[in-house]
Image (cartoon, rainbow, N blue to C red):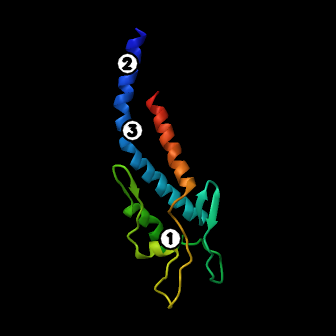
Amino acid sequence: MANNAFFRKLAEIQRRVPQVAKRLPAVAKREGLQFIADNFKNEGFEKKQGSYDKWEKKKKKGARKKILVGEKRGTRLKKSWHEGTVAKATSVEFTSQLPYAEVHNEGLEAGRSPGFTMPERKMIGPSEALDKRIEGKFDRMAEDIYK
């Protein structure tokens, strides 16, 4: 009798694994987009959990505004990652269609005055913090298979 229960459980697990595996890229995409939103909120790039490389502040006089947020362009930049990011069968590609997204993310030359380089304000890239967030979600999904 115990063997029948074991084989039923094994069959159930075999049935559920492909279903869960199919969902993994979408989960990674969702976590990555939340990671980008958190970086905007915290005005820095979270390389390690809880440790942010802060973005260079604006040099404008007057009231302190959030960097890249609240301005028309900043709001568009933040939302653009949702529009461009694609979850594929085995990977996720984070992209923005805005030409200035890469300039901000990488700190590249910008079309302002000759020789002007935009300060790097990384939103997405290699990050131990993001890897741990995604791995944590995957681990919880794997645990659910055995319940």
Q: Quadrant of residue 39?
A: bottom right
The disc at residue 85 is none
Could you classify mark 2 by the number of other residues whose Cα lies within 10 Å: few (under 14), some (14-19), or many (20 or more)?
Answer: few
Disc 2 designates what residue?
A: 7
Give left or right: position of 5 versus 115. left
Above or below — where is 22 with respect to 43?
above
Residue 102 image position (x, y, % from top left): 45, 72
Residue 86: percent from left, percent from top? 36, 57
| Alpha-carbon span between mark 3 and mark 2 | 20 Å
Q: Residues within 10 Å of mark 3 (few under 14, many from 20)?
A: some
| Outermost residue to the bottom | 114
Determine which residue is flagged by label 3. Answer: 20
- Circle 1 residue: 105
Q: Identify the image quadrant of residue 22.
A: top left
In this view of the protein, can residue 140 be seen by the observer? yes
Quick check: can you spot residue 72? no
Q: Is residue 10 above or below residue 25?
A: above
